[in-house]
Amino acid sequence: MLLPRSSLLATLACLLLIPLTLPPAWALDEVAQAAKEEGMRLWGIHQWERMQPPLEIAAESGDAEAMYYLGEANRLLSRGLSQAALDWYYQAAQHGEPYAMLRLFDGGACKLGDVCPENGDDWPQEALELTLPKAEDGDAEAMAALYYIYYYVEEPDEEEALEWLDRAAEAGNAWAMNTLGKRARDDENAYESETAQLEAAEVWFRRAAELGYAPSINNLSAILSNLGRNDKAWEWMTEASEAGHINGRRWTASCHIVPEEEGRDLCDSAPAPNPAIGRAIMLAIDEEVPGAYSNDSLEYYKEMLTPEQRAEGERMKEDWLGLEPPLSYFPEKFGP
């Protein structure tokens, strides 16, 4: 639930009076690391309530990233800046997490409640001063963070933001490559034709896909399909499934059941369909990722199978559960 303005101000003021009791960040022990991995698995499938207990174990060990994602979970659950989100963002910011600083700025933490950086009143500027030296020293993740930070500073600088995005990509940051691919894919005015636009996006998606970055593997498959190269598109969609991308896994299932459905050209290059396998995959997805399918969708596909195929699919479901890496939507770290 969102805080009323008066409660929000009181909460922000209280944050200044409570000293942080968390230890400085260090390498997590085995238990805390396992807890963080489980929390991040649940983050990947949008389980914002269930992810919190394991991430709290990592946060209590001083993991700033865990603190930030706890802020994200509470913000998304509340659809805005709740008290719990504020608290976790502030703790993450105190541990040097730049994205938490940008969330505090979005929520007006400094302006509304005087929860400001130690040496100023500007969270984006604090994020810049913290991140820029790391980027200049070659830290590719810091370079990628500057892409957002330069849009947030007092005088936003798109040119500088894009320069750092390019530098992050050239330094091997797969997220930056994927972002450049999405920018090309979505920029209808920058290219002479749709084909040129898609081919420009393909270059970046392929670079990140070849590094094993699942969102780019999925995006590359879609681009190749739109370019009419369905044989290669299907190869990459299979890779997406094996990398844990839920979209790739769902395509694998549906092409086993309805490969000839109008408008699903990608299935033309899939192996010969086996409806029982498709059913098994769907049931496994539904168990591993709650809400991945609506009841109507499951019933729609179920009706395409014979009773024997359904029964065989039930028996085969276990073969598709617990695969590594686990299924994920791969949500952005600094998303909507």
Image (tube, rainbow, N blue to C red):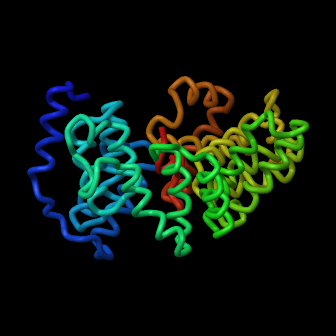
Frontmost residue, 191 versus 195: 191
* Location of residue 190 by image quarter: top right
186 left or right, relative to 79: right
* Location of residue 28 by image quarter: bottom left
Does any portion of residue 312 appear in the rendered image? no
Q: Residue at x 30, y 42 (%)?
A: 49
* Quarter occupied by the N terminus: top left
317 left or right, relative to 259: left
75 left or right, relative to 195: left
Frontmost residue, 193 versus 331: 193
Q: Position of residue 230 (x, y in %)?
A: 86, 46
Q: Position of residue 323 (x, y in %)?
A: 53, 60
Q: Residue at x 44, y 39 (%)?
A: 290
Does any portion of residue 99 appear in the rendered image? yes
Q: Position of residue 120 (x, y in %)?
A: 28, 52
Please state the total of marks drawn on the protein image: 0
* Residue 191 versus residue 24 in the image, above or below: above
* Location of residue 164 by image quarter: bottom right
Q: Position of residue 31 (x, y in %)?
A: 27, 71
Frontmost residue, 311 versus 249: 249
Q: Residue at x 43, y 42 (%)?
A: 46
Frontmost residue, 19 versus 174: 19
299 left or right, relative to 227: left
Q: Residue at x 56, y 74 (%)?
A: 138
